[in-house]
Image (cartoon, rainbow, N blue to C red):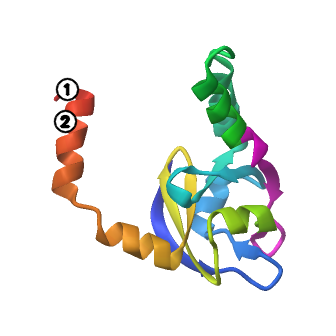
Amino acid sequence: MFIGEYEHSVDVKGRVIMPVKLREDIGETFILTKGLDGCLFAYSQTEWTNFEEKLKTLPLTNKNARDFVRFFLSGAIECEIDKQGRFLIPGNLRDYAKLDKEIVILGVGTRIEIWDKQIWQKDADNISADEIAENMDKLLGI
């Protein structure tokens, strides 16, 4: 399970150091793709396979389902962590997530999220634990 928040920098070539605490669980190669809310999602090979299996169950006849599958798969790329613990974020994905020099890497259970630091701080400042709990109550029926 991925947990924690880590601040890092993107070098001039688009490389980022994968935090040591996340590196073991993500593996030497992993899948990076466009995420929701303007961030990037990173999945271990095992979690990506699980995610792909769920995508395969979506009905081809439903436009929303096709758009959802297209969104995640068209932006997906296999990344490899080098001997110095770095991986390359391709330009199209850096552009999508508006990644500048400073980023935040979050462990969020089955995946990692990569955010531009300024965007993350703005979003994090707007998170209300009470509002989230209220909405989760509705979703989970607690």
Residue 131 appears at what percent x and percent y? 19, 52
Rendered image quadrant of residue 138: top left
Residue on which the image places disc 1: 141
Residue lying at 69% horizontally and 80% vertically, measured from the top left: 10
Q: Residues within 10 Å of mark 1 (few under 14, many from 20)?
A: few
Q: What span is colored magenta in the figure?
A: 73-87
Q: Amino acid at mark 1?
A: Gly
Residue 78 appears at what percent x and percent y? 81, 50
Q: Nearer the viewer, residue 74 or 102?
A: 74
| Vertical side of 64 occupied by 85: above or below | below
Residue 88 appears at what percent x and percent y? 80, 68
Q: Is residue 85 magenta?
A: yes
Q: Amino acid at mark 2?
A: Asp
Left or right of 64: which side holds 61?
Answer: right
Q: Nearer the viewer, residue 18 or 55?
A: 55
- Distance from label 2 to label 1 (Cα)? 5 Å
Residue on which the image places disc 2: 137
Rendered image quadrant of residue 113: bottom right
Label 1 element class? loop
Mark 2 near mark 1, Cβ–Cβ under 8 Å?
Answer: yes
Residue lying at 45% horizontally and 70% vertically, measured from the top left: 120
